[in-house]
Image (cartoon, rainbow, N blue to C red):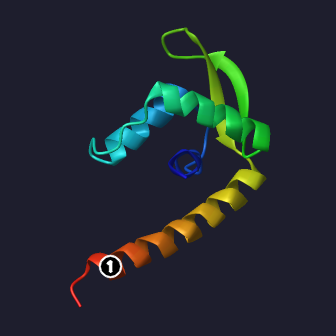
Amino acid sequence: MLILKTLARGGELHGFQIADWIQETSDDVLHVEEGSLYPALQRMLIKGWIAGNWGKTEENRRARYYKLTADGRKQLDRELERYGRVAQAIARIVEPA
C-alpha cells in the first residue's frame, strides 16, 4: 500500500526514491529495506499494478523507474479501504471504553 501510495503522487520514481520518500514522510518511523522493496516491486510489475522503464539516475546510474497503472490505482483504493477497516478495529480495541 505504501509503495502504491507513493507512486500515486505522480511521475516516475526509482526504488531508492520510493524508499526514501516513505522514510522521510514517516519522520523516519518507517524504513523499507531493499530486500523487501525490490521483490514487492517485481510482484507489482507482474500483477500489472505498476509499470517500469529503465533510465539513468542523477548520478548517471542505471535504474528502473516505476509508475502507477490504472489497475494499480484500483488496487490502492482497495488497500486503503482495507487499511481503514483495520485501523478502526484496532482503535476500538485500544481506546478506553
23 over 65 or under it: above or below:
below
Q: Residue furthest left?
A: 96
Foreground of the two, 66 or 95:
95
At x 59%, y 51%, the residue is: 8
In this picture, residue 50 sits left or right of residue 40: right
Give residue 28's position: percent from left, percent from top: 27, 41
Disc 1 crowd, CA 10 A, few/some/many (<14, 14-19, 20+): few
5 over 44 or under it: above or below:
below
Give residue 16's position: percent from left, percent from top: 48, 26
* Residue 68 image-quadrant placement: top right
At x 72%, y 46%, the residue is: 49
Foreground of the two, 92 or 41:
92
Residue, disc 1: 93
At x 36%, y 37%, the residue is: 31
Secondary structure under tag 1 reads helix
Give residue 84's position: percent from left, percent from top: 49, 72
